[in-house]
Image (cartoon, coloured by chain):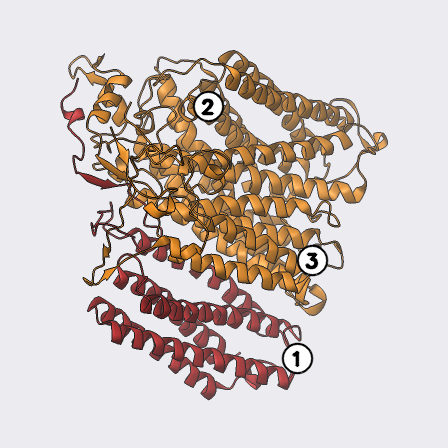
Amino acid sequence: MTIIERPSLTPVVAGSGVSVGVKPSQAYGSLRRPVSSTGWRSWVFTVDHKKLGIMYGAVAMFFFLVGGVEALLIRAQLAGPNGTVLSAGLYNEMFTMHATTMVFLFVMPMAAGFANYLVPLQIGARDVAFPRMNAFGFWCFLFGGIFLNTSWVLGGAADGGWFMYQPNANALFSPSHGIDFWGLGLQITGIASLTGALNLIVTILNMRAPGMKLMKMPIFTWMILVVQFLLVFAIPVITVALFLLMFQRAFGATFFDVGAGADPLLWQHLFWIFGHPEVYILVLPSFGIVSEVLPVFSRKPLFGYRFVVFSGAAIGFTGWGVWAHHMFASGLGPVSVAVFSMSTMLIAIPTGVKIVNWTLTLWGGKLWFTTAMMFAIGLIVEFTIGGLSGVTHAVAPSDTQQTDTYYIVAHFHYVIFGGAVLGIFSGFYYWWPKIFGKRLSEKIGKWNFWVTIIGMNLTFGPMHIIGLQGQPRRMMNWTEARAGEGFFNLGFWNRVSSSGAFILACGVGLFLINVIVTTRKAEKAPLDPWDARSLEWMTSSPPKEHNFDSIPVVHSLDEFFHRKYEENHETGELTKVATAEEVLADLEAHADAHIHMPSPSYWPIVLALALPIMGYGIIFSRILIVVGGLLVLLSMFAWTLEPSVADDTDYDPPGDPRADDGGPTKELATHV
Amino acid sequence: MSDLALQPTQASEDVHAAGHDDHGSHDDHGLVHATSTGLSNNKLGMWLFLGSECLLFGGLISTYMLYRGRHSANLGPDQIYDIPFTSVSSFVLLMSSLTMVLAVTSAQRRDERRMNLWLTITALLGATFVGGQVYEFTSFYHEGLGFTTSLFGSSFYTLTGFHGVHVTVGIIMLMALVGINKRGRIPGDRAEVVELVGLYWHFVDIIWILIFTLVYLIPS
C-alpha cells in the first residue's frame, strides 16, 4: 500500500542548523487549509496539474463556443445582401471579440490545458515545478476572460479589430470602455500565460525522469517547450504595448496620437513583435499533438524525430524575424520589405520539413484510421493549404494586393482552424481515454470529423475567392449591385461561406454530443487503447493523484513502446513482450513508500481575483485599485508564508494521517 | 519481458513529488532533490523571469528612443536633465548592488546578523534612489514637463517610472525578507532565497545602467 504521506510535526532543520518549526496554520489565523479531496473545494483550491489541465480545457471549450456564436453572427450578417442582423457598431465589436476570444481564450488556454495535463506525465514527474503558480495561472486566465467579456454589458465590447490598430483605437474613435476592457483583460490573461510558461519550462528542464535526456523527450513536450520560450519573450512585448495603450486612453498620454507627432507604427511593431511569435504559440502545440498521434496510428516511430525537434526550434527562432510581413502595406521602405519577405519565405522551410516528416511517418505504416488519426491527417492537408497561401503573402507585391481582404481571413483560418484546432480535436480523441478513462465514440467521432472538415472548407475556402475579388475583411455588408457576375459572384460565395459556418457549428456540436454520450456510457477504456508509445500511458487511466507509483527510468525515446515490444535486430520484426498492464504492475510493484504531494491553497485564486478588481478600478473607480492592491499584497504574503505541503494540524481532526476518520481523505491513494 | 526496461526504479524510501518547492524549496526532511539541470527550480524560474523582463524594458526603451526628440523647444532632454544629481543617485543604486552581494555572502556564511544588516542597508540605498527619482520627477513637473506635455515626457516618465516601480518592489522584497527572517520563517534554503532576491536586485541595477546611459548621457 502506498501512502501519500503528510509531513509530521518534526521541526524542520534548516541549512543553518537552527531549527525552524514551520507552522502553516499560523498563516491563516482561524482558517484551515483547504485540504479536502472531494467536492467543489477540491477543484477551486487545487494545485494538481491534472485538475488544472481539465479546468483549462473546460473553460477554453466554453470560450470556443462563445467565439463560435460570435462567428456565426458575423456570417449570418454576411449571408445575404444588405445584412441587418447586426448594427455597424455591434458588427465591429463582434469581429473584434471573435478573434480575441478564439486566440486568447480558446486556442492558447486549450494548449495550456493539454500541456498542463500531459507534460508532467510525459516526462515522468508528479507535478509541475510550481504547483500554486500553476493554479494562479489558471485563475488569471478564467478571471481575465470573464473580465473581458463583462464589457458586453458594461458599455460595449472592444471594437478596434483584434490587433487594435492605432490611432483608430483611441478614445476619440472608440469612446466606449470596450478597448480599456480589452487591454486590461489581455494583461491579466498575459500574466496567466507568462507564469504558465515559466512554470512549464522549469518543469521540462528540471523534472525529467532519470534517463530522459532532452533528445529522449516526447515530441509533444518538445513543442510545448518551444512554445513556452516564445511566450516568455513575446508576452512582455505586448505588455508594453498594452500599457502604452492604457496610458493613452486612461491618462491622456499621446503615444499613438498622430496629431501630437506620434508614430502609430510603433503600435504595429510592438503588436506584431508579439503577434507573429503568437501565431506559432497557437499552432506548435497542435504540431506536437499530431506528432504524437501519427506515429501511434501508423505503428511506426516518428520519422526524423530530430528533424521535427530542430525544425520546431527553428520555427521558434525564425518566428522572431518575420513580424513586419504583417505591415507590408504600411510603407516600411523597400529594404525592410525585402528583408522581411525573405525571412518569411525562409520560415516556410522548417514548417515544410515537419509536413514532410509527418507524411513519411505515414508512408509504409500500418495505418489505423481512428478519429484522432483522421483529425491529424486533416491537419496535414488543411494546414498545408494555409501554409501555401501564407507563402503568397511573403511575396510583398502580392501581399499588398491581399492586405485587409478576405484572402487574409481565408489564410489565417486555414492555419489556425486547419492547424491548431484540428490538432486540438485530434488530441481530444487520442487522450480522452487517458484523462477520463473512457474512449470517445468512434462512430460519432467520424461524423464529427467529416462534418467539421466539410464545414471548414465550405466556410474558409470561398474566402480565397471573395478576397481576391477584393471584398475587404471587416466589411459589414455587401450589395447585390456590386457583387459581380458568374463564377466570381461575391454574393454566391458569401452564401456558401455562411452555410459552411453553420455546418462547421454542427461539427463542433457533434463533438459535444459525443462528450455527453461518452460520459454517460459505463464502458471503461482499456489501459492502453491505442498501443501508445510515451510515458503518460504508463500509469492508470485516469492517472492517480501522484501520477506514478514509482518514477520510471527512461532508456529510450518511446520508452513505453520499448517496454512492450522487443525488436529482432536481424528481421526488424517486433514481438510483444509485455502488455501495458504488466508494465504498470511492474511499476506498482516497486512503488515508492512515501510520496509527498503539494497541498491545495487559497491564495492562488485570491491573488488572481485581485487583478480584475484592479482592472475595474482603473476603468471605473480608483478606490477599487486600492482594494485590489491590498488584496494582492495580502495574498502574496500569505502565499509566501504558507508551506507548500499542508501540516497535520490542517486536518480535522489532526493526527495520524492513516486514521480512517471519515473526514477529509488523507490516504489519497491506495495501491490497487 | 525485457529485463533492461524493467529494472526496479528509484527504490529510495522517501521520494518527494519532484516539484513542490513552490517557494524556496521547502523541505521537510532536509533532503536535497536533484534536478535534471542541477539548477534549483526557483533559480531557473528567476532567470527565465528576468529574461522576460529584458523584453519588457526593451520595449519601453525603444519607445523612449523613438520619442526622445519629440518635445517643445525648451523642455527637452538637454534642458531638463540634471546629470550630476542623477549620477549621484545612480551611484547610490549601484552601491546597493555591492551591499546586496554582501548580504548574499553573509547568508551563505549563515551570519544572520550581518545578513539582516546588509539587506536593510540595500533597501535603504534603494529607497534613497527612489526618493531621488521622486524629487527629480517633482522638479521636472515644476519646470513644466508633465506626463502628457509631450511625447518625450510621456515616454520618459513611463520608462523611468517602470524602473522605479521595479526598484520599489525590490525594496518591499528586501524588507519582507528581513521581517520574515527575524521571525524565523523563511522556508527551505535561506541563502538561496536571499540570492534570488539578489538576482532580481542586480537585474534592476543593470537595467538602470542601460537607462542612465541611453536616456541621460547620450545627448539628443
Output the chain of dot 1: B
Compare marks 3 and 2 and give the one earlier in the sequence.
Answer: 3
Q: CA distance from mark 3 to mark 1?
A: 22 Å
Q: Nearer the viewer, residue A578 or A644?
A: A644
Disc 3 crowd rating (10 Å Cα; few below 14, some 14-19, many 20+) is many
Residue on which the image places disc 1: B72
Give the label, 1 or 2, closer to the camera. Answer: 2
Is residue A51 positioned above or below A141 on the image? Answer: above
Q: In x, y percent, where is residue A217?
A: 30, 35
Q: Amino acid at mark 1?
A: Ser
Q: What letter labels the chain drawn in red? A: B
- Determine if marks 3 and 1 fall on one subunit: no
Check disc 2 and report its element: helix, strand or loop. helix
Q: Is residue A645 visible?
A: no
Check disc 3 and report its element: helix, strand or loop. loop
Q: CA distance from mark 3 to mark 2?
A: 41 Å
Residue on which the image places disc 2: A376
Residue on which the image places disc 3: A167
Output the chain of dot 2: A
Q: Amino acid at mark 2?
A: Ala
Q: In x, y percent, where is residue A621?
A: 68, 62
Residue A620 falls in image quadrant: bottom right
